[in-house]
Amino acid sequence: FGSRSTVCGRERVVATRFAAAMKPTCQTYVLSWHSRPLTLLKFNREGDMLFSCGKDGVISCGYAHNGERLGTYDGHNGAVFAIDITFDCRFLVSVSADSTMRFWRVETGEEIWKEQHGGICKFVEWCQHPTNQISLASCSDRFGSGESQSPNKIVIWEFEYDQYPEEPLTRRLQIDDDLPMKCAKIGWGPFDQSIVSIHDEGTAFVWCAKTGRELKVLKAHNAPLTGLQFTADRTVMITCSKDQTVKLWQTKDWKEIRKHKGDRPINDAALSPMYDSKDPTKRKYHLLFGGGQEARDVTTTAGAEGKFEAVFFNIVFEEEVGCIKGHFSPINTVAWLPDGSGFATGAEEGNIRVHHFDQEYWTRKYE
C-alpha cells in the first residue's frame, strides 16, 4: 500500500425522528481519507473492509469496524470515479478520468494490469457469478475528435488472471453506436444476463449482456439520474435523481414498485440488506438516501438548509424514519454494511462517515 492513516474523529450521534421519544443512537467514525469529493464507497462481501475513491485520484482501504486506514492504491493521474472488489476480495478494479482501467491485488496494493480504456471512464462493476467472477462491465464518455475520437460506450470484458503477466484482459462486447447518450452509471442485471445503464436525460436502458441488443427503455425520472444500486440478489433495482425522487423496480419485468418523493436533489440511495431477512425480528424495510443542495451553492447556505443529512425511509409504511446529520456538503455516495448493522456515507467535502447501529435499532420501535 502507498500510505497509512488513522481515523480522524469519533463521536456519537442521535438520529432525529418525528416522535421525540424515539431516538436511536449509533456509533460514528469520521474519516478524512480524501482531500476532494468522494465518488464511491464499497464494503467487501464480509463487511470487514471499506474501500473508497474520490476526485483526488486516491483509492483507500481500511477497517470498517473502527475506520483505521490500511493504505492506498496509487497510480491514477485523475479523478477516480468508481471501484469494485471481487467476492473473494482478491482483486480490485478502478476507472478514472485519466482514461485508464486498472486492476489491483487487494492484499498487497500491487497494480497488476493497466488498460487504456479510451474516453473518461465513469463506472465499472464485476459480474455477480459466485464462483466464476471473471467478467466485468465499464462505461466511458466521448472524448477527442476526428479519427482519434472515442465514443460513448459500454464495454464488457473478461479478466483471466491465470494469463498474467501476459495480457489477462479480453474485450468481449462493446455497445457504442446503439448508445444514444453518455452513461452516468451501469450495473449487471439478474444472473448477469443484462446490463442496465442510467443517463442524464432521465432514462434507463436495459441491454443484453451477450449481444448488446437493447431490451428495454425505462422513462425512469424527470431529471438526470444520479444513482443506481441493486439488492444483493439483483431482484430489486434502486434509482434516484435530481428530481428529488427514489424509485424501486422489480427486475423480473422492470416494473416500478415503489416511489418516494424527497425534499432535496438525491445523489445516491440503497435498500437495507435486511429487507428480506429470514429472521423476522431482524427485518428492516429501510431505504437510505442522501444528497442535498448543489455543491456550487453550498457556500451561501447553512447546513440545515442544504439538507445534507442521511435519510431513512420505510418503504412499507411510506414514512420517514429519521435522519442523521454530520456532513456539511452534499452526500455523493451511500453504502450499507452487508449485514445491515450500519452504513457509510461520502460527501463533497471529502469526509466519510461510518455509522454502526446500537442494539436499540433492532427493536420494533424502528421498523
Image (tube, rainbow, N blue to C red):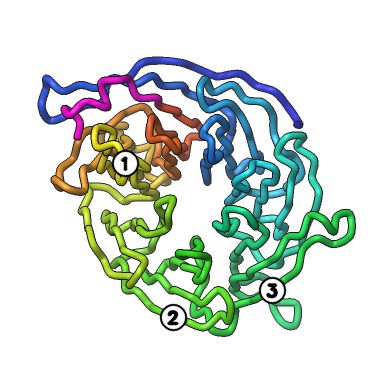
Structural distance between the alpha carbons of marks 3 and 2? 19 Å
Res 278 label: 1
Label 1 amino acid?
Lys
Instruction: Look at the image and say whether residue 10 sits in the magenta stretch.
Output: no
Q: Where is residue 226 in the image (x, y as percent from the top left)?
A: 41, 57
Residue drawn at (34%, 74%) of the image: 218
Label 3 amino acid?
Arg
Q: Which of 123 and 130 is in front in this view?
A: 130
Q: Which of 39 and 104 is in front in this view?
A: 104
The answer to whether residue 123 of the structure is visible from this angle is: no
Structural distance between the alpha carbons of marks 3 and 1? 38 Å
Instruction: Say which quadrant the C terminus sits in.
Output: top left
Q: Do the residues labelled 3 and 2 touch (CB within 8 Å)?
A: no
Q: Nearer the viewer, residue 323 or 215?
A: 215
Residue underneath mark 3 = 172
Structural distance between the alpha carbons of marks 2 and 1? 33 Å
Disc with the residue nearer the chain's start (2 vs 1)? 2
* Classed neighbour count for the residue bearing mark 3: other residues with Cα under 10 Å, few (<14), some (14–19), many (≥20): some
Residue underneath mark 2 = 215
Instruction: State the extent of the magenta-drawn residues as a range.
Output: 356-367
* Classed neighbour count for the residue bearing mark 1: other residues with Cα under 10 Å, few (<14), some (14–19), many (≥20): few
